[in-house]
Amino acid sequence: MSDSWQMLEGEGARINRRKFLKVLGVAGGGAVALSGCAGEPEKLIPYLIAPEDQIPGVATWYATTCRECPGGCGVHAKVREGRVVKLEGNPDHPVNLGKLCARGQAALQGVYNPDRVRSPLARTAGGDFEPISWEDALQRVAERLGSAERGRIWFLTGNEKGTFEQLVREWLSAFGSGRHVVYEPFGYEALRRATLDVFGIDGLPFYHLDEARYILSFGADFLETWLSPVELTRRFTASHAFQNGSMGRLVQVEPRMGLTGMNADEWIAPVPGTEGLVALAIAHVIVRDRLARVPADVSRIRQVLDAHTPEAVAGRSGVAAETIERLAREFTAESSVALPGGVGSQHSQAHASAAAVHLLNYVAGNVGRTVTFAPGYDPSGGSSYRGLADLAAAARNGEVGVLLVHGANPVYASPAGLGFAQAMRQISFKVSFSRFLDETAREADLILPDHDPLEQWNDYEPRPGVYALQQPVMQPVFDTRQTGDVLLELARISGGQAAARFSASTYRDYLMERWRQIQRQVGARGTFEEFWNEALRRGGVWTEVRGRGASLAAGVSRLQFDAWSAPEGSLTLIAYPSSALYDGRGANRPWLQELPDPVTKVTWGSWVEIHPETAARMGVAEGEFVEVSSEAGAIRAPAYLYQGVRPDVVAVAVGQGHTAFGRYAEGRGVNVYGVLGAEPQEFGGIAYYAAVSIRKTGEYERLAKTEGTPRQLGRGIAQATTLAEMLHGEFHPEHTEHAAEVPEHIEEVLEQWQERQYADWRNRGNYAGEHPRWGMVIDLSRCTGCSACVTACYAENNIPTVGKAAVQRGREMSWLRIERYFEGGNGEPFEARVIPMLCQHCTNAPCEPVCPVFAAYHTPDGLNAQVYNRCVGTRYCSNNCPYKVRYFNWFDYQNPADPAFAWPDPLHWLLNPDITVRSKGVMEKCTFCIQRIRGAQHRARMEGIPIRDGDIKTACEQTCPADAIVFGDLNDPDSRVSRLALDPRGYKVLEGLNTRPAITYLARVRNRAEE
Amino acid sequence: MAAIAQPERVTATPTYREITRDIVATLGHPGRLYWIALGSALLVLAIGAGALLYQIRYGLGVAGYAPPVMWGVYITTFVFWVGIAHCGTLVSAILYLFRSAWRTAVYRTAEVMTVFAVLTAGLFPLIHIGRIWYAYWLIPYPNQRQIWVNFKSPLLWDVFAVTTYLIVSTVFLTVGMIPDVASARDRATGWRKKLYELVSLGWKGTDQQWRHYLKAYLYLAAFATPLVLSVHSVVSWDFAMSIVPGWHTTIFAPYFVAGAIYSGLAMVVTLLVPLRRAFKLERYIHEDHFENLAKLILITGMIVGYAYAVEYFIAWYSGNPFERSAFWNRAFGDYWWATWTMIVCNAFLPLLLWFRKIRRSIPAMFLISLFVNLGMWFERFVIIVVSLSFEYEPFAHGHYTPSWVDWAILAGSFGWFFTWFLLFAKNFPMVSIAEVKEIIPMPRRKEART
């Protein structure tokens, strides 16, 4: 337990039974009726008089919006007995259509985070924080605001596109200031600047990946963090999944293969910084060979294109001229789109690279088709690092009187050279609205904790035309207040002009006022009441904004296209956003810390990706700490040898290395901002590339990675084929024990024996047809390896997080894991394959007969059940499981008195009440979400209707952004799962063992270039 | 401590009287060395017990388990002790049936070792399970919950095999001791006299008693003999019945039985050498005995070595990729050192016993026996840990390193074993008085009278 937490545990701040019952009772009144009130609930409602919309044991669902990243997905929050216990995507929401990523799933650990600020805190003379009352806190701020000079009040927020942003602006102007800085560490300054330069449009493009058969991505990590990853995953899969005999093609041009690169059909690794040149060279070929109907105004960039011949670019980029020519032909052969670099490939010339990609799209005629523009679209909310740097400079010059910070943590997430912490110390009064004691909040004088997004009224516009509402899904867990209410209250206390400015007394009223305008904008009929309630029910309102085409801006011919290049002899560091922790804001969620990185499979820490050649040259082995130093500073982290980075590149994920931010984040890994340059780049953003040198240190750590052997050893676990093979019917799944090796006379005996084993079960009525046979199909041509399912499984099934030391011993409990295997490399094309591995619910399950006490047994509907109560913990079942999907409770993760307790108060509120938490010494495993199966069966029985295919969705299937998982009844020949299981790509893992798994995998298909 | 007659002079061929006197003398007043030995055993036992309590309190995670290696030092040590337990029955029952006269001097030690080794081994399945407080669920007893055990599970067979073996070997030991305990009874005083009276079951040494006794002993020997083969076969099925590459093989039962006898014989040597010295039994246990034990060790050791070779051959010849890589991993993977320790200690070092000189050299025998013990522990470690760490699913391969708790409990098991052994050795004759007398030449009338 950290000191800060102890300190916060003052009188009344604790969650005790009494307060818990209050929450329980009042939330029963319905979240809609809660309004934005932040005070104590008015009365207790005992369950003796049951609230009408709360039935104990039956979940209530509320629509709201995920605020874990700028994506803005719609969420349905499952509320049981007044507590939110699970988040699922809102199927109506246009961004995510019912899906969520791992970060979205982990939002639950934000609201119940044990390290939340539990009441207003004020800095004492000694430098510590002490809890104070809200009245006192507001009074203190109002005094400072009153005495602050005009124009010296600054407000720093994260991306708050929507009503809150409007409130901040109005509020600031009411106090006579216009100093609103928006800062998202991963802003889109470069892309925004390039769009302005090339097309004269201020706003980012929409990329219609689903309409493109050919996607050429120059480092865009659109499956991980770029723009709106859940939506882009869906759109990508729509184009790229193998269906009806065809599929799209993804070519990833980037010096470090990330998750998106792993999903590419071809990975091309140029010299870091030269992606833009490659794009221009492709454009050159298209124009030269008239491969597309090139728009007439392309003549204005003739000079630029002429200069970038494939031969000239090949020398600088390391991409062969023939490859460039081939890419140009492929790019123009079918509908295509080129994606500019993501924030993970952002160097000082990122705007030029993005502009080059814009030109390529333009030349190929994609603009207006697969690339459209909606002015004002910016998922980072107009964030600007230059704005932050200006704020820091102003603070140093004593020009900032009062700084208010909401939803941004620049002390952590900005280059160390900027010295934001020191700059903040020059400001006489800093107010933070942070929910956590993060690095920036620690520098504040006063902390006025905001509600969690799941506890507040708000709205958010993830993109033009989509207005998503947030409503409180439960009573606040702590003594926090919504910042919108606090701002209005402050205006009221301050009196005068500021008070007169706002008519709304609560933020909810303010929000509704704006929504009256929105009603007019979208032209919805009916009363506002109807409109509002319908919007709440649906989670918002949306109109389809398709975006439009564009033509080249006037100044386009003056653009410079330089490549970034590292000085001779140095390596290039690529700092990329962590797919789980993003810019570090996920670091205090144990689910995300324990979620293996989709590429390296490392958890709970940082690592430096180094090419094995480079490592061998330096004598660095995996796990050895290396020091990465640039002009700006140095960091030390263990090495991870990875052939997915070029030999002249090292890569480190952003997100770890917190010095504050709670027990799960603090003192873990390194903060890569320590080596990034502080100077804002020409386009106004941070360069996430740096020229570095590395040095071995001789110290070692066992990497906390969940992977054993990274190669398949020819065992056909994750199988793949090529499109050509599929089209010619040449694909036959590999079997690890080839028929040819089994003598003919034995074969017959073997078959009889197998059949007999199977019949043994059938004779007992297990598969006689009166029961369903639950099964699953996982399509590897859809699965991207994003790992959303893993976190969904943790959330649904009360899986404990075990911490770094346990993961180092391989004791993670994740019932569902994404296995990642590497193929090729060492001269061959380097590729990765992923496969979700969970209990296969075998028909001939090897785990069952070996259990001496029948804790592992077979249910009549074919599930491989595990009776926790009966388990004595011999662990023989796990030894005998060829898939290694059984997990043992090494410690007492469920016991609050035990040091291993996985859900410190109030984190245990997120436990799914339908599931037990397992005690020490018992085995557990995937149940195919048996609680969902039985729940649906009970409902069906009560309502007297049969269960239809698709009624039951497992948690992993429900959240999969790529729709790779299908669950259903294999005994029903018409179910989706039965039909998909017959796919020619279908195979079962380790089929030769005669376990007869219930899960059929459909082999991945790679759309390789025609030779 | 009850008074016991002190040994007198030692002559070349002992007389009946000298035998009784010498052997009963071993029950005499314990010297300092004995107390030091017993004290250390108890200390080590206490450390092990402390580690076990710690493990029960916090969970099995305090041991070094690293999935997929779900069985580690505990099961290794379980098999190790069960294996050791095999020699006792072999020496006492099988050699008895074959009328091998030389067994008489050593069989008691072997039998005692057997009983305590089974007693030690039996602890490990309990130590190793996740919820030790529910261990009784493994016993099929009628209960209101109407739940039953799974007779398909080899672990259940184990429960039966080990308990059967414990009961039979205990009965065999106590029955075999009756005449000797009676001899001790006649010389003991105080509480020990009472104890001996109880254990000797009123033995008077009448002809009728001898007639019944020898029949009973023969019958018990015949009854115990199959257990030598069955118990360790069943233990081996814990592994062979699974589908783990490196476990799932038909050679396991004979391979394990040979290994068990092999390790048990080595342990007998390890125990006999110091015992002989401490109890001054050089006249009764001499080089001939060690040579005979050495020959048995040599033959079983060669069987074990052959089994290793066959395992590797079959792994290659079967063409099964999983078997192949499992065995490749054994020899050249992370745990190559454990595998090679096992191979050198078990398959190569005992070949020295082809030399008569070595067979008859007591220090050399002692040294070799220690290596065989070590090697046999590693054999189980390699079979269990190395096979599990490198199974079917490459992504789930793992690496196991035992923690201090594993080592403490392993050491504690030796403490437990030696505590019992030492207590027994000072209270019961470790060489069979009656049977040694049977094999010495019939005394001439004159000598007998003296």
Image: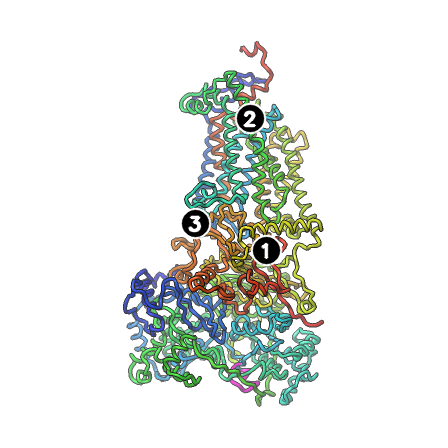
- In this view, the residue in front, A234 or A606, is A234
- In this view, the residue in front, B234 or A412, is B234
Q: Is residue B189 left or right of residue B68?
A: left
Residue A817: image location, x then y, percent: 53, 60
Mark 3–mark 1 distance (CA, rounded to whole Å):
38 Å
All told, the count of numbered labels is 3
* Placement of A582 over or under A205, stated as above or below: above
Q: Amino acid at mark 3?
A: Tyr
Q: Quadrant of residue B295?
A: top right
Question: Dot 3 corresponds to which residue?
Answer: B58
Which structural element holds mark 1? loop
Mark 2–mark 3 distance (CA, rounded to whole Å):
48 Å
Residue at image coords 61%, 43%: B341
| Magenta residues, start to end | A193-204
Residue A954: image location, x then y, percent: 49, 63
* Placement of A156 over or under A262, stated as above or below: below
Q: The numbered mark 3 sits on a residue in which chain? A: B
Question: Dot 1 corresponds to which residue?
Answer: A996
Mark 1–mark 2 distance (CA, rounded to whole Å):
50 Å
Q: Amino acid at mark 1?
A: Arg
Question: Dot 2 corresponds to which residue?
Answer: B219
- In this view, the residue in front, A530 or A10, is A530
N-term-proximal mark, 2 vs 3: 3
Q: Is residue B111 left or right of residue A931?
A: right
Q: The numbered mark 2 sits on a residue in which chain? A: B
Q: Report crowding for label 2: few under 14, some 14 to 19, many 20 or more residues within 10 A (C-alpha).
A: few
* Placement of B92 over or under A711, stated as above or below: above
